[in-house]
Image (cartoon, rainbow, N blue to C red):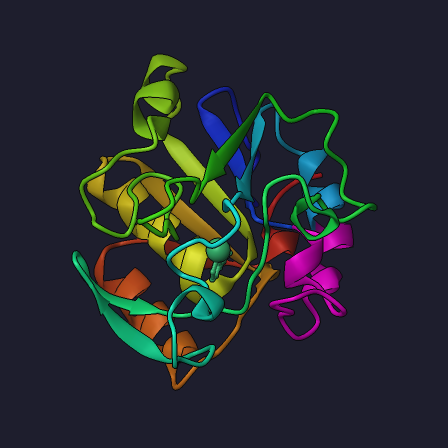
Amino acid sequence: MIKPGERDCLIVVDVQNDFCPGGALAVADGNAVVSVINRLMGGFAHCILTQDWHPQGHQSFASAQPGSEPFQTIKAPYGDQTLWPDHCVQGSRGAEFHLALQTDRAELILRKGFRPQIDSYSAFYENDRQTTTGLAGYLRERNFSRLFFAGLATDFCVRYSAEDARREGFEAVVIEDACRAIDLEGSLVAAWESLDVCGAQRILSDAIAA
Ligand code: VGL
Ligand code: ZN
């Protein structure tokens, strides 16, 4: 049983309407994470939320790339970039947190993906893998050492956030049943393999004391 302490922080990734059923980039069963996460929050002294937050016409939107379709991969100046349906547009209903998600105890809400020409899956580094969001510095100043990840989607924003947490020297723990995946062309299997290689742990939510 894990009893989260003062140096542990729960990072809730992108639990927003557009990633839930009925949303623009719906993750199957995405809303199922909400009750698990609300319960988890009770066990953590510290919690932060991330929010995917794109300007209209964002470079990662297929609608912004003439002749392309959602879920296609293009070459961005910084490398391969998957194109998505328009989602999580700043100020839209789709960008809001799921209505049932408890947000009151979040100590920070980190927005990402707001630069028009760079996507950001990770809460630490944008997709060019160089532009930082400032989160590592914040977490270090708060003296956190172990980060627990939950939210959407397992194989994109949760994966890259947990991997970058390792890269920044934090312990990283992914709470599997508090996440759901997009699973695009084997991306979920690839995500768990890669998380394992970088030393992220994988647990179920019942391993955390309430
Ligand atoms: C995400 C694709 C595009 C995510 C965000 O939260 O996993 N995926 N933007
Ligand atoms: Zn996005």
Q: Quick check: 34 left or right of 149?
A: right
Which residues, given as a range, are shown in magenta? 16-36
Q: Quick check: 119 left or right of 95?
A: left
Q: Residue furthest front?
A: 66
Judging depth in this view, the residue of 41 and 114 nearest the camera is 114
Q: Is residue 39 above or below residue 186?
A: above
Q: Position of residue 210 (x, y in %)?
A: 71, 39
Answer with the quarter of the image where residue 185 lies: bottom left
Q: Is residue 77 above or below residue 89?
A: below
At x 65%, y 40%, the residue is 209
Q: Position of residue 123 (x, y in %)?
A: 40, 41
Q: Is residue 93 above or below residue 138?
A: below
Does the magenta portion include 38?
no
Q: Position of residue 59 (x, y in %)?
A: 37, 57
Judging depth in this view, the residue of 144 and 188 nearest the camera is 188
At x 69%, y 53%, the residue is 94
At x 53%, y 43%, the residue is 53
